[in-house]
C-alpha cells in the first residue's frame, strides 16, 4: 500500500497536526485519498488512508514528471526516491534518475568567486573547506550509485527489488 499524504506532498517530519490534518482533509476532498478510522491502542483511533484511483494517477504523474526542485533539492529528491519503486517500468524510473544525474553533473558550489564555483582546495577557511569536501564525497558516492542503478534499470532481465 502506498502511504498517501507523504507521496503526494512531502511534509517535514515535525509537521504539527494542525498542518497535517487539514492537508489530509484537502487530499480527501479532492478525491485523492479515502479515509477511515479504526480502533487504535487504548482510546486512540487510527486514521487509515489509501489512494483512490485518481490519487494513484496523480502520484504516478508526480513521480514520472517531478518538478525541477524535486530533482535539485536533496530532501525532496529523497522523498521522490522513497516512492520511485511505484513508478511502473524501469525506463521511466531511469529517466527520473537521469534528470538527477544531469543536475549533479552541472558545475556548482556552495560558494562562488567572480562567478566561478569555489573548489574545496580554494576555500578561505577550514569550515567552508569541510562543507565542500563533504559535499564532494557525498556527490561522488551518489554519482556512483546513480550510474549503477541506471545501468541495472536499463539492462534487460536485471534483478530489481520493487514495492
Image: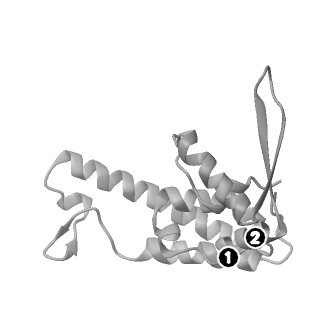
Up the image or down, 141 lies above or below 146; here it is above
Q: Is residue 93 left or right of residue 40?
A: left
- The C terminus - image quarter: bottom right
Name the mark on residue 87. 2
Q: Is residue 8 left or right of residue 72?
A: right
Q: Secondary structure at mark 2?
A: loop
Up the image or down, 40 lies above or below 128; here it is above
For the residue pair 92 and 19, the one nearer the viewer reads as 19
CA gap, disc 2 to disc 1?
7 Å
For the residue pair 21 and 144, the one nearer the viewer reads as 21
Q: Is residue 54 left or right of residue 11?
A: right
For the residue pair 150 and 6, the one nearer the viewer reads as 6
Q: Which residue is rendered at x = 42% and y = 55% of the image? A: 137
Q: Position of residue 151 (x, y in %)?
A: 69, 73
Q: Secondary structure at mark 1?
A: helix
Res 43 quadrant in image? top right
Asked if disc 2 and disc 1 are in contact, CB closer than 8 Å, the reply is: yes
Q: Which residue is rendered at x = 44% and y = 75% of the image? A: 105
Crowding at mark 1 (Cα within 10 Å: few <14, some 14-19, many 20+): some
The furthest residue to the front: 29
Name the mark on residue 64. 1
Q: Which residue is rendered at x = 72% and y = 56% of the image? A: 4
Q: Is residue 8 left or right of residue 138?
A: right
Q: Which residue is rendered at x = 73% and y = 58% of the image? A: 28
For the residue pair 85 and 148, the one nearer the viewer reads as 85
Q: Position of residue 18 (x, y in %)?
A: 54, 42
Amino acid at each position: 500500500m502506498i502511504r498517501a499524504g507523504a507521496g503526494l506532498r512531502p511534509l517535514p517530519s515535525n509537521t504539527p497536526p494542525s498542518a497535517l490534518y487539514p492537508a489530509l482533509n484537502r487530499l480527501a476532498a479532492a478525491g485523492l485519498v479515502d479515509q477511515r478510522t479504526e480502533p487504535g491502542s487504548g482510546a486512540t483511533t487510527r486514521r487509515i488512508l489509501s489512494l483512490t484511483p485518481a490519487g494513484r494517477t496523480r502520484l504516478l504523474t508526480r513521480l514520472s514528471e517531478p518538478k525541477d526542485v524535486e530533482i535539485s533539492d536533496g530532501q525532496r529528491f529523497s522523498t521522490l526516491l522513497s516512492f520511485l519503486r511505484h513508478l511502473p517500468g524501469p525506463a521511466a524510473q531511469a529517466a527520473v534518475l537521469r534528470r538527477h544525474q544531469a543536475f549533479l553533473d552541472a558545475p556548482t558550489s556552495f560558494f562562488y568567486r567572480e562567478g566561478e564555483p569555489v573548489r574545496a582546495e580554494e576555500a578561505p577557511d577550514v569550515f567552508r573547506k569541510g562543507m565542500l569536501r563533504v559535499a564532494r564525497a557525498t556527490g561522488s558516492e551518489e554519482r556512483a550509485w546513480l550510474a549503477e542503478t541506471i545501468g541495472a534499470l536499463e539492462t534487460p532481465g536485471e534483478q530489481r527489488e520493487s514495492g
